[in-house]
Image: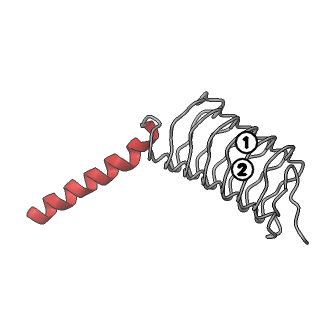
Amino acid sequence: MKKFLIVIFFTFININHSFSACDDPLGDGVDYSFCQFSEEQDLSRAYAPNSDLSFISFIKVNLDKAILMNTNLSNGNFAEASFFRANLYEANLEGGNFEKSNFTSANLTRVNFKGSSLIEANFKDSNLFGSDFTGANITNASFEGANLNNSIWIDGSKCNLGSIGVCNNND
């Protein structure tokens, strides 16, 4: 009987926890993985560092000036989202859809963009120092004035120092 009650207790905790995350308010370390949200939400100035936003849909979301340092946005759908002046330092955006997204003046230092779709994304004046674009689709993306120093380019080559607006490498 005691074992039966323990099993039921832990089952209830796990069920309750797994379904409540999508309703939790944004904050440090929140887990929104696999949640679906309505389009065009205004989450400007959101504070969600160290959070898990993987496999979610945030189409046309406004995350201007948001703090998303060390946040996992991998495999999510962020098409036409705005990250103007957002801080995504060391965030993981691997495999995500960021087509037509705006990263103007954003801090994208050491961000992982591996395999992401960045078609027509705008990186104007953003800091991409040490970011990794290996295998990403950057068709018609704009890097005007962006700092690409020490970034890993789509072909796996490293951008040299002085790579502003374009990846300069020896290849």
- SS category of the residue bearing label 1: loop
Asked whether, in this view, residue 64 is left or right of residue 135, the answer is left
**Is label 2 in a helix, a strand or a loop?**
loop
Identify which residue, 168 or 91, lies in the foreground: 168
The quarter of the picture where residue 138 lies is: bottom right
Q: Which mark is residue 60?
A: none
Q: Is residue 39 left or right of residue 36?
A: right
Please name the residue shown 81% across and 70% down the image: 157
Say the numbered circle drawn on residue 97. 2
User: In the rendered image, which quarter contains the N terminus?
Assistant: bottom left
Residue shown at the point (73%, 52%) measured from the top left = 128
Q: Amino acid at mark 1?
A: Ala
- Which residue sits at x=65%, y=54%? 93
Residue 79, numbered circle:
1
Name above or below for residue 84 compared with residue 129: above
Q: Residue furthest left?
A: 1
Q: Position of residue 144 (x, y in %)?
A: 87, 43
Q: Residues within 10 Å of mark 2 (few under 14, many from 20)?
A: many
3D distance between C-alphas at marks 1 and 2: 6 Å
Quadrant assignment, res 4: bottom left
Q: Between residue 9 and residue 63, name the one nearer to us.
A: 63
Rendering coords of residue 84 (x, y %): 70, 35
> Which amino acid type corresponds to the residue marked 2 in the rendered image?
Asn
